[in-house]
Image (cartoon, rainbow, N blue to C red):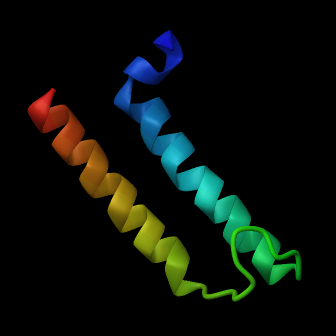
Amino acid sequence: MPVFRRWEIKLLVAFQLPAFAETCQDAGIPLLGATFDPLDYFMYGIGTASAAFFDTLVF
């Protein structure tokens, strides 16, 4: 899909989907798990930032 060619869009989607699932877990909705951990947001950020770095470096 042409919209996913830009690394910014890929980074946004890769961060927002698991962050949404984590927010649902905080609200008591077991989406992709049932345990809320606020540290997960930080880990999602590190993972997506490193993926974006390597994506721009390699491609």
The answer to whether residue 47 is above or below residue 33 is: above
Residue 37 figure quarter: bottom right
Q: Residue furthest top?
A: 2
The spot of residue 38 in percent (x, y) is 60, 85
The answer to whether residue 10 is above or below residue 49 is: above
The spot of residue 33 in percent (x, y) is 70, 77
Q: Residue furthest front?
A: 32
| Camera-nearest residue between 51 and 32 | 32
The spot of residue 16 in percent (x, y) is 61, 52
The answer to whether residue 31 is above or below residue 39 is: above
The answer to whether residue 18 is above or below residue 17 is: below
Q: Residue furthest left?
A: 58
Q: How many marks?
A: 0
The spot of residue 3 in percent (x, y) is 52, 16
Q: Is 31 situated left or right of 29 in this image? A: left
Q: Residue at x 29, y 44 (%)?
A: 52
Q: Is 55 situated left or right of 26 in this image? A: left
Where, quadrant-wise, is the C terminus in this rendering? top left
Q: Is 33 situated left or right of 28 in this image? A: left
Q: Residue at x 45, y 75 (%)?
A: 42
Q: Residue at x 52, y 78 (%)?
A: 40
Q: Residue at x 32, y 54 (%)?
A: 49
| Camera-nearest residue between 46 and 33 | 33
